[in-house]
Image (cartoon, grey):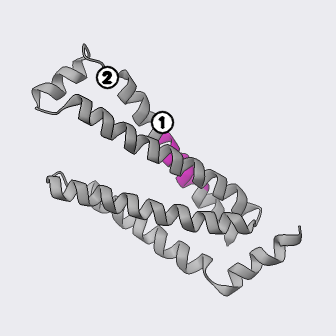
């Protein structure tokens, strides 16, 4: 079961990293003469603010994605540090997504995707803490310590 979690976390890490890298790539391609920049300005969207926020969000996604990849590798090898790191990563991710959700809610830009994202993160958080906090799971990592 632990290795199944490792595979799921690996897939989440790949997805987060890919979305973050794609976001950075798109933001780096927007310049003042770009058609996208003109369309954003016509819609009264501040391009520089969008780029700043987009860079921050994309960077956090890349960092969280890479941390998830490291966790997945460690969990697959039953390393105690990976269990602890995953619980930290998913906790920080929950705080990040709650802040993002609250920002969208307060700005009036809340879409159904936001509800889906926050629901998924809360579910992963709850399942992760519930599973990796079990005494039997913690013991499995401690037994493997000598290997």
Residue at the far right: name it. 147
Q: Quadrant of the N terminus?
A: bottom right
- Verify whether residue 14 appears in magenta: yes
- Along the line of sight, the residue nearer the viewer: 95 or 123: 95
Q: Residue at left 50%, top 64%? A: 90
**125 left or right, relative to 28:** right
Please provide the residue range marked out in magenta. 10-18
Say which residue label 2 marks.
Answer: 30
| Residue found at the far bottom of this picture | 135
Judge left or right: residue 76 versus residue 86: right
Q: Which residue is mark 1?
A: 21
Instruction: State the predominant SS element of the stretch in magenta.
Output: helix
Q: Which numbered circle lies on residue 114? A: none
47 is higher (above) or lower (below) than 16: above
* Secondary structure found at label 2: loop
Q: Quadrant of the C terminus?
A: bottom right
Look at the picture and state if 57 lies above or below 140.
Answer: above
- Number of residues whose C-alpha sits closer than 10 Å to that of mark 1, classed few (under 14), some (14–19) or many (20 or more): some
Residue beneath the point at 68% across and 70% down: 2
Quarter occupied by residue 87? bottom right
Label 1 sits on a secondary structure element that is helix
Density class for disc 2 (Cα within 10 Å; few <14, some 14-19, many ≥20) is: some
Which residue: 23% across, 29% down?
Answer: 47
Q: Is residue 6 above or below residue 69?
A: below
Where in the figure is residue 18, as x and y percent of width and height? 50, 40
């Amino acid at each position: 079961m632990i290795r199944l979690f490792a595979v799921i976390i690996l897939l989440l890490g790949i997805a987060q990293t890919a979305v973050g890298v794609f976001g950075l790539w798109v933001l780096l391609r927007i310049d003042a003469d770009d058609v996208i920049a003109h369309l954003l300005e016509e819609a009264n969207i501040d391009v520089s603010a969008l780029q700043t926020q987009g860079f921050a969000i994309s960077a956090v996604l890349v960092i969280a994605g890479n941390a998830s990849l490291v966790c997945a590798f460690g969990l697959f090898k039953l390393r105690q540090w990976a269990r602890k790191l995953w619980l930290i990563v998913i906790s920080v991710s929950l705080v990040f997504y709650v802040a993002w959700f609250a920002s969208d809610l307060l700005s009036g830009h809340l879409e159904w995707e936001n509800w889906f994202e926050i629901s998924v993160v809360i579910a992963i958080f709850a399942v992760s803490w519930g599973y990796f906090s079990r005494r039997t799971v913690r013991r499995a990592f401690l037994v493997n310590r000598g290997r």
